[in-house]
Image (spheres, grey):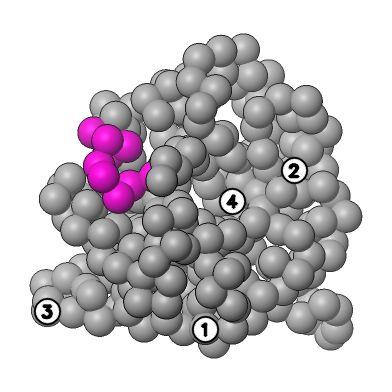
Amino acid sequence: MSRQPLVAGNWKMHKTVAESEAFIQGLLPRLTTADNVDVVICPPFTSLEAMVDSTRGSRVEVYAQNMHEEGSGAFTGEISAAMLSELDVHGVILGHSERRAYFGETDEALSNKVVAALEAGLAPMLCVGETDEEREAGTTEDRLRIQITEGLSRIDDAQLASVAIAYEPVWAIGTGKVATSEQAQEACAFIRSLIAERSEEAAAAVRILYGGSAKPDNAAELLALADCDGLLIGGASLDPESFGDMVAAG
Ligand code: PEP
């Protein structure tokens, strides 16, 4: 089965609305090639509405960087799935390692977030990945198995392929230390095998992305890996030229 590559930019806590507008005006004219690649930007909450408006009619989809699992309630500072879909946001990143590390995001909460996102019509992108210590200790696959099994535990097999998985080794995020092709392929293939334990059909269709210090000069090599169907990009997605080059590599 052929899987359409997905190249996504995670802006983290960068860009005001004005800066987001400047980015998108710089990016859109660069998206003249490779319309066989899905292009996603993940701005901060404050820029979501402006980016949905500015990308309407283009091939760029807008994802949020997080959401709460409950529909509403006393959760100061949080945002629900319905609030995102009301803005016409297309999807949402769930379980980024920064959210897991700094905001105590658990696999249990993520399993509920995946359900809430799908129920609201949002495309979830579930992030998983091992720490440096786990890789050194040889427990990478144990960590990935827990994150995938628990994160996807509350959805049916028929929904598995609606979730994109981003394999992001924590030691590679924002460090300039990209995984080797062998490491990235091995982990992406392992994740696909975990999905196959539930459904061979879903495993063939599910998109698995690599994230961690991906740059224009290593994008093509990563995107050529058999089990890597896209990139989740942090730092290199903040500049329209560099992000546009990485889309063109897809
Ligand atoms: C990320 O934040 O998801 C990421 C991959 O960051 P960077 O590309 O900067 O390593």
Stretch of the chain drawn in magenta: 221-230
Marks 4/1: CA distance? 30 Å
229 magenta-colored:
yes
At a point 40% along the width and 50% down the height, the residue shown is: 209
Residue holding disc 2: 47
The secondary element bearing badge 3 is classed as loop
Foreground tag (2 vs 4): 2
The secondary element bearing badge 4 is classed as loop
Marks 2/4: CA distance? 11 Å
Q: Which of marks 3 and 4 is nearer the N terminus?
A: 4
Q: Say whether marks 3 and 1 touch (CB < 8 Å).
A: no
Q: Say whether marks 2 and 4 touch (CB < 8 Å).
A: no
Label for residue 137?
3
Q: Residue 81 at x, y = what percent?
A: 77, 66
Residue holding disc 1: 153
Q: Earlier in the sequence, mark 4 or mark 1?
A: 4
